[in-house]
Structures are given as structure tokens and as C-alpha cells.
Image (cartoon, rainbow, N blue to C red):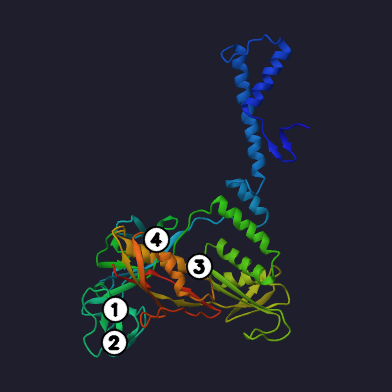
Amino acid sequence: MSSFGLTETGFIPKTLEDIKGEFEQDFQGEFGTGVNLEPESVNGQLIGIFSERLAELWEALLDLYASMDPDQATGAAQDAIMAFTGTIRLTAKYSTATVLATGDTGTVLPTGRVFSVPGAGTRFDTLAPATLAAPAAWASSHAYALGDIVSNGGRIFYATAAGTSAGSGGPSGSGTAIVDGTVTWRSLGAGTGVAAVSVQAEQTGPWPAYAWSLTTVETAVAGLNTVTNPLDAVLGANVESDALARVRREVELQSSGLAAADAIRAHVLKVLEEAAVQDRAVAVFLNDEDTTDGDGHPPHSVEVVARGGDDELVRDAVFGAVAGGIQPVGTNSGTVTDSEGGTHTVAFSRPTEVPVYLDIVIATDSTFPADGINLLKATLADWGDANLNMGDDVIQSRLYAPAFTISGITDVTTLAVGLSAWPMLEDNLAMGLRDLAVFDTSRIRVNGV
């Protein structure tokens, strides 16, 4: 059996030296051992030309062999292999954000207006027209919630901490932490009108725009004064790499042999991924017993708790994942049409998103970067969103580790967590089964620098 080509251990190609050696032996066998095979001779030149061409063919055969191996295929070849098992490479996605624009009431922002993060070169475009409208006027002794927007004294204000307003006066000035009774306000800017505008990064990929950073108006509009984003942008993504796609395909194949709950979760997540849903999370509660369980699930039922995607998309995913005879239950119910035109009632639930607040006091040395505070906030927010799943408690001590990844931080003297800006404690936050802790740089305060 030849030691080259397709062997029991795989495909072994002939190298350029292997091919040249075989040609030289053939020439000597045909023309005698005295034939001139020096590289500069005619024979040597011919052997060199033919050997290079054959070596290219062997390399092409090796590439063809590798393209049929899930562990070696790349690019289009890997896409073709994944398609056999229903795995589709995740496409590139745009970062998105919501911007609050202030200015004159009635000002129209056309589609395609450009805003950017100063110094970062990150540009976002408006996705639809928006018209600035007058918000509610500030009221005394009024209960305000986080995110409420009011006008007062020719300026627009955003509530960064809930509470009850003072008996008179109201917020004023251009501050970022204006105390009004027990409410804390942030000034958005001068004007009488405001609009929430959806924006999208001009390029695909994970372009960040952390809270309150998207503030530069690149394309001016008469009557528009200021823009800013009260929450972090939802990060986009680059096209899924060969390595990540290969791992995800293996996970999806393995999930088909797992317990039913794991397989259902994998299927719903896959549907959300392929629909380019960026903020996604799925939990599954399965009751395969003949009696109602302690969480109130009826016999032989499943509750899928899904974050992200529209209701119809999630219901279709649940219907495609749940076996016959198992009842999908939840707080969000609707109908799904099967391939034969029949309709089925399918329910699922949405998680309760719990905003988490952090208050961190640090000590630093001279190596702490100029943008270290923003970097620390982003690191903590990214860690929380990446490491905490539905139902996971916020363990306060685990947040120290990501904090110390920032150069120049010599000590963390206080790290308090809370469900509101105050009170905050150096303790854990317990989450319910359907709770999802959500982090954002706008809810992280850094002191001590």
C-alpha cells in the first residue's frame, strides 16, 4: 500500500522533494545513472517545473480532503458541512442603541442622521424619522420612576434614581446628579422637546457606545441641541469565525442527545441566534410528572422563559422543540400554525429583567489609564452580562476579580450592589428562577480616583 494519498491515518500528500526524488530516479532508470540532473541543466529544469506543478495538485487534494473534515474545513466548505446538520454560521450584526435627542419642539430628525462617540470614531445612524415633542412638565411632590423625562426652566431632565420630587423649584442647571427631593436627575440639555431615537452603528461588529457617551452630532439639524444614550449600546458582532462555528456545531449535535430540557433550550437559543437576536437568554422548566409541581407547572408541561426575539419567533421555536403530549405553558400565549395548516396554542414566559446597581471605591497608582473609570465600568458590566444566566444570584465577591483586571487599581475598598441607587450593601443579590440580572455602565458609580 502506498504511503501517500488516502491512508488509514488520513491523507498524506507528496512533498515537492518527494516528487523531485521520484523524477530523478525515473530519469536515471531511463537514461542511466550518469545523466545530468543538476538544477541548472535542461533535465534538472524540466524536473523542477514538473515537480512544482504536481506538488500544487497534491496540495489541492489535501485541501479537498480537509474541506470534508468538520475539524479542518474553513469558510464555504465549513458552511456546507454545517448545513448537513442544520447549523448556520452566525452573520455579522450591527451595534444598536437608543438616543435621547433634545431641542426645539417639532424638530424633525430625518433617517440617516449621524451621531458619534467623541474620540472613538464610533458612528451611529438614525434608523427612522423622529419628531421632538414636549415631555411632561416637572411637578412638585410627585413620585418619579427611573427613566422618567421632564422639562423645567427651558431644559430637559432624565431621572437616574427614582423618588419623590421636592415641594418647589425642581431640577435646574447642566449637572449629571441633580438632587430634587429624593429624585436624582441628569440634565439632557437645553430645549423644550425630546425624542427617543433608535440608532445603528455604520459598520457591523461589536462597536461600543457606553451610557452617556454617544454625544456628538455629526450631521447637524436645525432645532437639535443635544443627543446622548442613557444606556449602553447593544453590541453587534462580527461574522462568526470558523473556530467558534465549529464549536457551536458540536454543541448543537450533542444537545440532541441530552435531557429534554437541555435540548429544548439549545433549539430555542439556536433559533434566536440565527434570527440575529443579540440580547438572548433561555431557561427551561420541565415537569414530566403526573402531578403539578411545586412551581405550579401542570403535569407533563414545559415552561420556556426566553429573553429576546419577537413573540411569534419564540412561539415557533418552542413549538418546534417541544415533543407531542407536552403542554407549553407560560404567561405569553398565542397560536402557531403547523405544516398542515392546523393551529396550536403555545405559551412561554419572559424573564423579569432586574437592573443591578454597583458602587465601587478604588485606590489607584500612576499606571491607572486616563479613561480608567469608563474602562472599569465597561469591564464590570460586560462581566455581569456574560457570566450571569437566568436565576443566577449576583455574588458580590465575584465582582472583585474583573475589577482588578484594570491596570493601576491597587485596592478595592468598597464594592456595594443594590436594586436601586440607594441603599446599597456589600452583600449578594438573590434572584428568582425567572429573574435575569442586567448590568449597564449607567448604573455603576466609581469613586476614589
Q: Earlier in the sequence, mark 4 or mark 2?
A: 2
Quarter containing the N terminus: top right
Expressed as whole percent of the image width and height from the top left, the position of residue 26 reads 71, 17
Q: Are marks 1 and 4 in contact (CB under 8 Å)?
A: no
Which quadrant of the view contains residue 44? top right
Amino acid type of the residue tagged 4 in the rendering? Pro
Q: Secondary structure at mark 3?
A: helix
Q: Earlier in the sequence, mark 1 or mark 2?
A: 2
Cα distance in 3D space between marks 1 and 4: 24 Å
Q: Are marks 1 and 3 in contact (CB under 8 Å)?
A: no
Q: Residue at x 64, y 73 (%)?
A: 336
In this orientation, does residue 7 appear?
yes
Closer to us: mark 3 or mark 2?
3
Instruction: Check disc 2 and report the residue beneath it.
Output: 165
Q: Earlier in the sequence, mark 3 or mark 2?
A: 2
The foreground one among 218 and 18 is 18
Q: Are marks 4 and 2 in contact (CB under 8 Å)?
A: no
Q: Earlier in the sequence, mark 1 or mark 4?
A: 1
Q: Secondary structure at mark 4?
A: loop
Expressed as whole percent of the image width and height from the top left, the position of residue 278 reads 50, 64
Instruction: Check disc 1 and report the residue beneath it.
Output: 185
Q: Secondary structure at mark 2?
A: loop
Instruction: Check disc 3 and report the residue beneath it.
Output: 387
Amino acid type of the residue tagged 2 in the rendering? Ser
Expressed as whole percent of the image width and height from the top left, the position of residue 43 reads 62, 13
Q: Secondary structure at mark 1?
A: strand
